[in-house]
Image: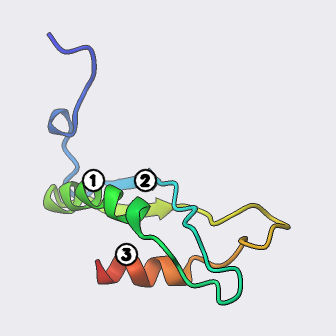
Amino acid sequence: MREYNTFDDFNFENKTVLLRVDFNLPLDKNTFEILDTTRIKLVLPTINELIKKQAKIVILAHQGRQGSWDFISLEKHAKTLSDL
């Protein structure tokens, strides 16, 4: 017997899933362009599984910490996620 649940143990159809992800991506200090998309790529299987199970997904994330140089909007992250 398993000690934990998996996505197969739940019905996600038409349910809203709050997905907290760590998208603190490395950025270029001058242009704020994303240098590495690995963290976004690693969450894609989870997102795709939830889509396959017809879930509505709300993604929560942030970039950097308030007051630090890399505390920016997630607009570029959203575009990257959409492209992938």
Looking at the image, residue 44 lies above or below residue 17? below
Disc 1 + disc 2, Cβ < 8 Å: yes
Image quadrant where residue 55 sits: bottom left
Q: Quadrant of the N terminus?
A: top left
* Residue 2 figure quarter: top left
**Cβ atoms under marks 1 and 3 closer than 8 Å:** no
In the picture provided, is 20 more to the left or to the right than 47? right
Which residue is disc 3 drawn over?
Answer: 81
Report x, y in % for residue 22. 52, 54
Q: Is residue 78 above or below residue 50?
A: below
Residue depicted at x 23% and y 49%: 12
Q: Quadrant of residue 15?
A: bottom left
The spot of residue 60 in percent (x, y) is: 52, 60
Q: Which is nearer the N-term, disc 1 or disc 3?
A: 1
Q: Which element is circle 3 on?
A: helix
| Residue at horizontal 69 percent and vertical 63 percent from the top | 64
Report which residue position mark 1 lands on.
46
- First in sequence, mark 2 or 3: give its number: 2
- Which badge, 1 or 2, is on the more N-terminal residue? 2
Instruction: Tell me the mark number nearer the camera, choosing from 2 and 3.
Output: 3
The CA span between labels 1 and 2 is 9 Å
Q: Amino acid at mark 1?
A: Thr
